[in-house]
Amino acid sequence: MPEINMSVTILDVAREAGVSYSTVSRVLSGYEFVKDSTRQRVLEAVERLGYVVNQQARSLAGGKSGVIGLLVPGLDNSYIAEIARGIDEVLSKASYDLLLYTTHRTSTETSYALKMTKGLADGLLLVVPLLTTAYVETLREQNFPYVLIDQVDPSNRSSVVDSLNRQGAYEGTQYLLSLGHRRIGFITGLMKLRSAEDRLSGYLAALRDAGIPVEQDLIQRGDFWRKEGYEAAERLLSLSNPPTAIFASNDLSAFGAMEAIRAYGLQIPQDISIMGFDDIPQASLVYPRLTTVRQPLDEMGRIAAQLLVEQIENPDRPIHHVTLPTSLVVRESCQPPRHP
Amino acid sequence: MPEINMSVTILDVAREAGVSYSTVSRVLSGYEFVKDSTRQRVLEAVERLGYVVNQQARSLAGGKSGVIGLLVPGLDNSYIAEIARGIDEVLSKASYDLLLYTTHRTSTETSYALKMTKGLADGLLLVVPLLTTAYVETLREQNFPYVLIDQVDPSNRSSVVDSLNRQGAYEGTQYLLSLGHRRIGFITGLMKLRSAEDRLSGYLAALRDAGIPVEQDLIQRGDFWRKEGYEAAERLLSLSNPPTAIFASNDLSAFGAMEAIRAYGLQIPQDISIMGFDDIPQASLVYPRLTTVRQPLDEMGRIAAQLLVEQIENPDRPIHHVTLPTSLVVRESCQPPRHP
DNA sequence: AGCTTTTTTGCAAACGCTTGCAAAAAAGCA
DNA sequence: TGCTTTTTTGCAAGCGTTTGCAAAAAAGCT
């Protein structure tokens, strides 16, 4: 009795159960008009023979693959893992498999997305996609279900899940101001992404509302990755009048900045305070533990997956834009400046 | 002129180019006996119509998918990202796409692996699989190409890439001994995995060779994850005669132990030294930076991908077992004990 | 120019499944 | 019991591609 036999086809099951292969197909798809005794016979034959469906054939023949594609920019960022966790929670309940494609080479983003629309996946979740205009239009034209996560669609015709980036950065900056910091360095994210823009905008708004003039030297370019965060922090620290605090656009950049601060022989938070954005698990792992603006990443994943599943099951469903609140998580990386 | 049109099939291209669809297929697969002018005509039609192949149909009809499946236990561990990086480097050169399946729910490991054998992928890379006996036998019987990474096959009939776990742990323990530590706590990995066994074995061998008796209380169970590392360290620290150093079976466990040490009000490395295993990127990010035994993770991925690609292209190729050396990376988390 | 060999191409079958339609069987009703 | 409606099932076509085989065309040789 084989547990699993890869060479068994639906024809073998049909023969074993004494029915047509279309009846086998109907049993497996849960079609209601199948006699119970027939269903039983088929299921027993499936088990006896160790039948595994050929997903390719099923997709080609018009069935649903039962797979959701998740397109992420890379793996070495817990931000992705946190979102994926929320996604997986919803998808497992809805009996979908999650298929992950990484696009650390940007050129693959389009080709992967389009590959997935050809029967490989029933829908697509796009995490911080860079090239939205190129293929999202194609996805929409083909009525292929997709949801954008932490990135907006300039044409406002996509379902999107993101968070209050601007508000979060505003509050984070306010917190640093409330500690007495007046020279607050800011490390941007990748500025072609809307989240990076919004976070910078929140920082600028908080300064303006506090009547503090913006100093361009205190704003340094980053790209959301640690290495650029290190370099941006270096530039901030080498100013003739360096900041007393640094607000990095995400936790990874903050980690890089922390390294630069230490390489400068300075102490966190005694000499310079540091704040991040995201609250990935490592934020509470580094020492001192990072004060950060929290994005509910797993909830973002959850909601995106729900939107997508609903869209697949109700294709006429209107698009949604869900924006989640951020919250400030105060840990040990910030304190009042040495000289007020 | 559409850039990409998802609804174009090979029939449309054939019509547009004035040839049969089998000629189109031959052109796309690089078959040598096609007239150059015909080839040109077909390629222009492909471009003009924005044709994208249906991968499902291609797989079903007997073609290669050009996809390698990567089965990993979870995403929130940079160990995986590092291995994936090496894999991706080789696969992109060999023009294979990488398809990642996560199995944080163990029950999906078997079903994902078997799904992939049905035309979805041309080969499979299995990273620290837990359930090797159940389906690896099936993969082998079906002559489906696969390589195990950082896990052995008890039957010794699989291609495997791993590292000198025992030797690495031996040298790590020796290093702590050379600093003067005589009470060295050890946090195990998940003991059903060979790497966990080997690392414990290396620790024990180093103690034995140094003539130091093994104390069972100094060996605490972990599972390679941070939380268990925290708890194992708590147990070590609450001993009446606690260790002066802790050797954790992997970096994640070491991070958890670092947290426990701090929660105990102790300082690293002044009060207690800590060592990990893997050298994931975070090891040089935590403070103090972690001394650890380095596994060349990206090289493991590279070699595994090479073995797999070669196996796919030469099915008669014999199995290989490649074991890579580890190396000690001394950073700032260890120093001689306070009282020799 | 005719014959042989090589190149080129289309036909047809196949891959493993889903599903519309119609026929057969069963159930319900008067 | 006969008629109507509902349930159950198999037939046949199709999905989009690959590939073996044979026919047609071209090239090579005498």
Image: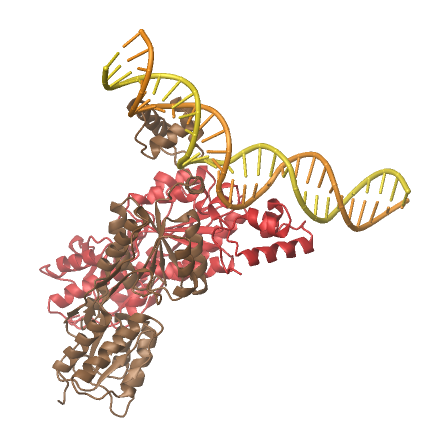
Chain colours: A brown, B red, C yellow, D orange
**Is residue B105 something one can see in this rendering?**
no
Left or right: B25 in relation to A299: right
Q: Is residue B230 above or below residue D27?
A: below
**Is residue B117 something one can see in this rendering?**
yes
Comparing A110 with B203, the one in front is: A110
Quarter location, residue B325? bottom left
Comparing C1 with B125, the one in front is: C1
Residue closest to the far left:
B240
Residue A203: x %, y % from top left: 23, 79
Quarter location, residue A209? bottom left
- Residue name at image x 65 percent, y 54 percent: B39
Quarter location, residue A259? bottom left
In the picture, the quarter occupied by the C terminus of chain A is bottom left
Comparing A152 with B31, the one in front is: A152
- Residue name at image x 34 percent, y 42 percent: B110
Residue A240: x %, y % from top left: 27, 92
Residue B242: x %, y % from top left: 13, 62
Q: Give the number of callouts.
A: 0
Residue B188: x %, y % from top left: 24, 54
- Residue name at image x 35 percent, y 40 percent: B133
